[in-house]
């Protein structure tokens, strides 16, 4: 049993004293391991003992304290989920990488549900997203909770789910795939190799699902009159929580995208396409999501619940709904993982099949552009990522100009056909 397995074991007896420099809670263990139950601290009122976890530094301190004795184990079991989340966040780089995406994925659905309660909450979530993933984590820590059972489940999922699916992403568009013969095939679907960090990319997809699964349900079940996040709101997650130096403001006929110089873009020197770390996360996802390998993996799940819809808008909605299941959703890509999801997926497909033409989500395709992304009120991460990147592609076609695009020229058809774009033809 390694240190991480030992720490998150359900059996507190598995948590042993470590030989390294003691933390505050370990000092507590040393101080009380040979004392009797009449030691003054145990005579304190229970409500005072319950305050102890609030003064610890991280989740490791908390686990060590909880394993000290029966009284402190009771304190641990009674600790609030918000305190546990704070302690987990303090250990995020050690136990919950990628930081901060892992803990956001574990808690952001609670924040999404809270934000949909009223406009004030919704605006608070928008502002948090505009500050980037650190701002989003801060709001999660303020509004969400995490239990030790949640942490143990998350720890187990790293080996059963996160690592295998990250490896698949790496083969689709990462360093590993770059070593595969014929990886750089003609359709350009893997051009983002060496630009994508597989685990972070997986969590960016997962967080999108956790945030907007309820919005998808609003379209699948229109008679329920459920609240939902609109297209502009979802684009704020794409722009600011999946930052990219090539994402910037532009204007096209019928659509305008604005990137405010805040959050991850606050320190970006004007016009040179650079940001700290020079991460190209949108570029990576832009090629990953429509890639053959990624789409074929999800197509197997879709094929297991029924044939493709003849109407493209239903098929596009079904495809997006299946992929929008959040942290546990990639289970269905694993061998034997689909059976657990089959009842839910079949129910979603049946709901989509029953939709009337009047229930079709509003959508339009940007004019004059080859393989242009579809702008839809219904969540569709593939097209929303493409939309965030489109300003850069237009500028590349003109001869790169860092200034924001204010409109199209008559050569727009040439622009769209003279630059390398990932094919979105499967969903247009």
Image (spheres, rainbow, N blue to C red):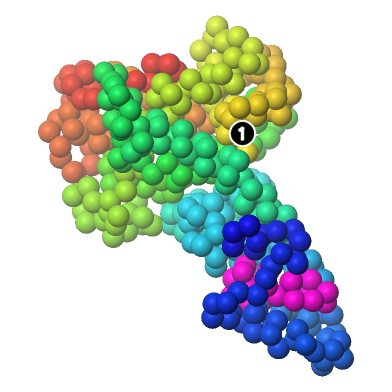
Q: Could one spot residue 233 in this view of the protein?
A: no
Residue extent of the magenta highlight: 54-73
Query: Going 42% across and 41% down the picture, which residue do you hit?
Result: 198
179 sits to left or right of 308: left
419 sits to left or right of 205: left
Are there few (<14), some (14-19), or many (20+) residues within 10 Å of tag 1?
A: many
Rendered location of residue 327, percent (x, y): 60, 41
Q: Could one spot residue 241 in this view of the protein?
A: yes
Query: Going 74% across and 71% down the picture, which residue do you hit?
Result: 67
Q: 213 or 29, which is in the foreground?
A: 29
Residue 56 magenta-drawn?
A: yes
Rendered location of residue 47, percent (x, y): 82, 79
Residue 293 magenta-drawn?
A: no
Relative height, residue 183 to residue 402 (above, below): above
Q: Residue furthest left?
A: 399
Q: Disc count in the image?
A: 1
Q: Which residue bears the numbered disc 1?
A: 331
Query: Going 43% across and 24% down the picture, which residue do you hit?
Result: 293
Main SS category, magenta section: helix
Q: 347 or 253, which is in the foreground?
A: 347
Query: Going 75% across and 67% down the picture, which residue do you hit?
Result: 13
Relative height, residue 346 to residue 161 (above, below): above
Image quarter of the N terminus: bottom right
Rendered location of residue 24, percent (x, y): 61, 82
Image quarter of the C terminus: top left
33 sits to left or right of 157: right
Rendered location of residue 304, percent (x, y): 63, 16
Secondary element under disc 1, as helix, strand or loop, is helix
Q: 19 or 134, which is in the foreground?
A: 19
């Amino acid at each position: 049993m390694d240190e991480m397995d030992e720490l998150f074991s359900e059996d507190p007896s598995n948590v042993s004293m470590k030989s390294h420099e003691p933390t505050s809670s370990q000092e507590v263990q040393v101080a009380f391991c040979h004392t009797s139950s009449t030691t003054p601290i145990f005579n304190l009122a229970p409500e005072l003992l319950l305050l102890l976890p609030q003064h610890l530094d991280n989740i490791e301190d908390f686990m060590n304290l909880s394993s000290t004795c029966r009284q402190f184990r009771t304190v641990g079991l009674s600790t609030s989920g918000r305190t546990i989340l704070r302690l987990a966040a303090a250990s995020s780089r050690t136990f919950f990488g990628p930081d901060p995406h892992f803990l956001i994925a574990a808690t952001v659905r609670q924040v999404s549900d809270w934000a949909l309660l009223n406009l004030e909450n919704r605006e608070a979530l928008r502002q948090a997203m505009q500050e980037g993933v650190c701002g989003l984590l801060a709001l999660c820590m303020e509004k969400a909770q995490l239990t030790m059972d949640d942490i143990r489940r998350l720890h187990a999922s790293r080996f059963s789910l996160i690592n295998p699916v990250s490896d698949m992403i790496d083969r689709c568009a990462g360093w590993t795939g770059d070593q595969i013969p014929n990886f750089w095939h003609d359709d350009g679907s893997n051009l983002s190799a060496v630009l994508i960090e597989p685990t972070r990319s997986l969590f960016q997809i997962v967080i999108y699902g956790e945030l907007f699964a309820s919005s998808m349900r609003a379209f699948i079940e229109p008679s329920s009159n459920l609240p939902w996040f609109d297209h502009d709101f979802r684009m704020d997650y794409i722009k600011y929580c999946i930052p990219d130096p090539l994402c910037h403001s532009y204007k096209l006929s019928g659509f305008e995208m604005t990137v405010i110089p805040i959050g991850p873009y606050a320190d970006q020197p004007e016009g040179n396409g650079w940001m700290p770390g020079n991460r190209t996360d949108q570029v990576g996802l832009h090629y990953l999501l429509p890639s053959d390998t990624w789409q074929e993996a999800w197509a197997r799940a879709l094929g297991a619940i029924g044939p493709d819809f003849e109407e493209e808008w239903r098929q596009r909605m079904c495809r997006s709904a299946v992929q929008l299941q959040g942290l546990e959703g990639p289970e269905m890509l694993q061998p034997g993982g689909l059976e657990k999801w089959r009842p839910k997926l079949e129910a979603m497909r049946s709901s989509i099949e029953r939709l009337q033409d009047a229930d079709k989500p509003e959508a339009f395709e940007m004019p004059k552009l080859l393989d242009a992304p579809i702008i839809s009120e219904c969540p569709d991460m593939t097209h929303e990522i493409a939309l965030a990147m489109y300003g850069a592609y237009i500028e590349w076609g003109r001869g790169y100009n860092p200034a924001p695009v204010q409109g199209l020229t008559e050569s727009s058809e040439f622009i769209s056909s003279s630059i390398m774009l990932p094919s979105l033809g499967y969903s247009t």
